[in-house]
Amino acid sequence: MLSKLTFISEVLNKVIDSKEISDDDAYQIYQESQHDPSELYKIAQILRNKQKGTKVTYSRKIFFNLVNLCRDSCSYCTYKSEPGQSKISMMSKSDVQNLAKIGKNYGCTEALFVTGERPEQKYVEARNWLKENGFASTSEYLIHASEMALKEGLFPHTNAGNLTKSEMNDLKKTNVSLGVMLENSSIRLTQSGMPHELAPSKHPKARLRVLKDAGELGIPMTTGVLVGIGETAFEIIDSIYAIKEIHKKYGHIQEIILQNFQPKSDIRMKNIPSPEEKYFKTLVALTRIIMPQMNIQIPPNLSPDSYASFLSVGINDWGGISPLTPDYVNPEFSWPSIDTVAKNSFNAGFELKARLPVYPELFSFVDPELKEKILQITDSDGFVKTEYLK
Ligand code: SF4
């Protein structure tokens, strides 16, 4: 067997020569980096700089918490509400319209629409709310809400769980991209006592089906993994390879989010600590090694004291940051101000650039009418022109 440094250097040479590394290589790198991941971090950073230069991106967004009832129940979820709880959100059409106008005034370019998984299948309250607004399903409402946001000058990006192929095809007319977190490709995490036991929509087969359908439709997709929910490191590596396989076929995965689990007092996993930073960073760096050209994102609000350090392990994106609305998925973590993110990025040697919810390299996937609108507000590199951020 090669020595640790030699083995990692061999792999570096492979990825720098644009050769792929196998999952066995990735397992071995993980194991050999556990004690001292510095060589791995360095390699990830070299690759990041080679592929992405010294720009780091974010999307200026408004978070539309359209409806947070959900037919599923993940052990780590604090987003989901039950009828009667104070955190319930069921936005009316006028709520959507008003928030879109405010978002536009704040210089936002992304309308992020988030819902629970098919709430109307479980709750009469959701069915009545849809009926009052003139719709038979959440996805019908999403189409209408997206049209409203688009009219106000925002670019919609919807994250509504496992949409069908036909629903995604409809949303493609107004949404420049869609999102669905894979979370993890391990079936073990759906078993009794595990975080996805009561969430059939999180079965890896179901999630991978959505990613494949989106690929067949040519829709730019955001996906990612949730780290620290009882998985093994190898299961994270397998999840990244599962995403890579689909992307190889369709070329439509635009970014991978690595999200670090955070315990909350109102969830079943409240006593599970968040993952250790070294473990998390090692997986971030490995993701860069496995997919050198991918956009890799971590949300800055979930690591408020240390997020800038993730720039040294291979990320190139901070995801959506809202100057106005909270992160309803992690409400206890407020967004850092965009100026603070820009300053911290600058101090680490990077320039913060605003992007749309769709990345420039996937503009060609977008509906031609939407693309025309995109080109009006972006510069020659595909970033948002500064005058639209005022
Ligand atoms: S994480 Fe999503 S699918 Fe799971 S319970 Fe929460 S809203 Fe529902």
Image: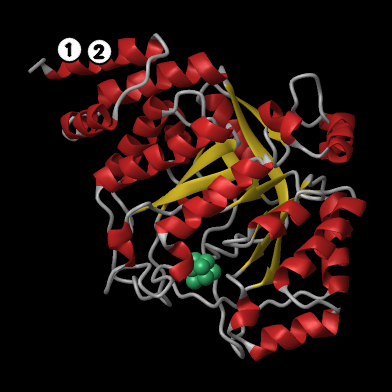
Label 2 secondary element: helix
Label 1 secondary element: helix
Residue type, numbered disc 1 = Thr
Residue visible at 16% across and 29% down?
32
Residue at image mark 2:
9
**Which quarter of the figure is the C terminus placed in?**
top right
The answer to whether 390 appears left or right of 61 in the picture is right
Residue visible at 34% across and 20% down?
42
Residue visible at 38% across and 23% down?
44
Quadrant in the picture for residue 187: bottom left
Foreground residue, 336 or 69? Answer: 69
Task: List the single residue furthest toward the left.
Answer: 1
Residue at image mark 1:
6
From the viewer's perspective, is residue 2 above or below residue 270?
Answer: above
Please provide percent x and percent y for residue 292.
Answer: 45, 23
Contact, mark 2 vs mark 1 (Cβ under 8 Å): yes
